[in-house]
Amino acid sequence: MRFAIAALALLASTTAPAAQIHVTTASHVVVQVDCELLHFADLGSRAKAIGLAGGTHEIKVSSLYGKPILSLTLDVEPTEMVHLNYARRSLQITSRDAVGATPAPAAGPPPGPVAMDAASFGKLRSAVSDESFSSDKVDLVKSAASRNHFTIEQVGALIEEAVHSSDKVEIAEILAPKVIDPENAFLLNEHLTHSSDKEEVQKLFR
C-alpha cells in the first residue's frame, strides 16, 4: 500500500504542470498571465508565472491605471520556460529554455531605432520650408513620421518651420512617438513662445 502511494506521488510530481513564463520590463506597467498578476520588485526586474500547464496562455499588459496596452496568446510546451521582454509597447520573446536548464547568456538588447541621417533630414526640412500653407507643412511631417525616427534636435528644427503656435504643437505631437531621445525634450522649449504650449509639449514626453 505504501509503495502504491509513493508511486502515485512520484507520478504526480513528474506529470505536474511545469511550464513557466518570465517577463522583464523597464516600464511602469501591469502584466497578467491568464488573469494572474505578476509582481515586479522594481523596474528592470523579472517576474514569473510558474506551474503552468503546456498549451496556450494569455498575456495582458496594461497601464498602472488599467488602460489596456496589448494582449497576446503564447503557446508553451509543458516543460518549457519562456522569457519575454516588454519595451516600447511591444512584448518580445528573448529565449525559450527547458525548465531547470541553465539559460543561455542573454543577448544584448536589440538595436534601437535610428534617427534620420543629416542629409535626409536636410532634404525633409527644406521640403517643409518650401510649403506655403501650414496644413501642407504638417502633412509632410506626418508622412515623414510614418517611416522615420527623429532626435529632439530635429523635432525642434521642424517646429521652427511652422508659423502658427498650434502647428508647432501639432508637429511635436506627431513626432513624439518617433523620438529616440525623449529625455532631451526640455530643449524644445526654446522653439516655443507661449508657456501653455511649452507645458503641452513637455507632457507629450513624460
Image (spheres, grey):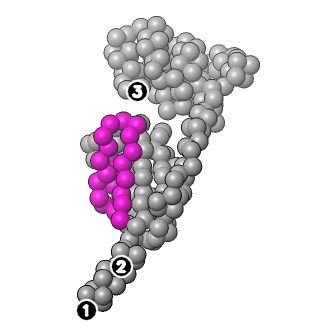
**Residue 48 within the segment the image draws in magenta:** yes
Residue 204's disc number: 3
Q: Which residue is label 1 attached to?
A: 1
The earlier-in-sequence mark between 3 and 1 is 1
User: Where's the C terminus, which quadrant?
Assistant: top left
10 Å crowding of disc 1: few (<14), some (14-19), many (20+): few
Residue 95 vertical placement versus 187 (above, below): below
Check disc 2 and report the residue beneath it.
Answer: 10
Residue in front for this viewpoint, 33 or 71: 33
- From the top left corner, tell me how far across and down residue 204 is, in percent: 40, 27
Disc on the earlier residue, 2 or 1: 1
Instruction: Provide residue 179's location: percent of width, then percent of height.
Output: 53, 27
Residue 160 belongs to magenta span: no
Left or right: residue 37 compared with residue 185: left
Q: Quadrant of residue 142?
A: top right
For the question of whether residue 174 can be seen, the reply is: no
- How busy is the neighbourhood of tag 2: few (under 14 within 10 Å), some, or many (20 plus)? few
Element under disc 1: loop
* Magenta segment: 30-51
Residue 16 in view of the camera: yes
Q: Is residue 40 above or below residue 194?
A: below
For image coordinates 51% across by 58% down, the residue present is: 101
Identify the element where label 2 is drawn: helix
Q: Quadrant of the N terminus?
A: bottom left
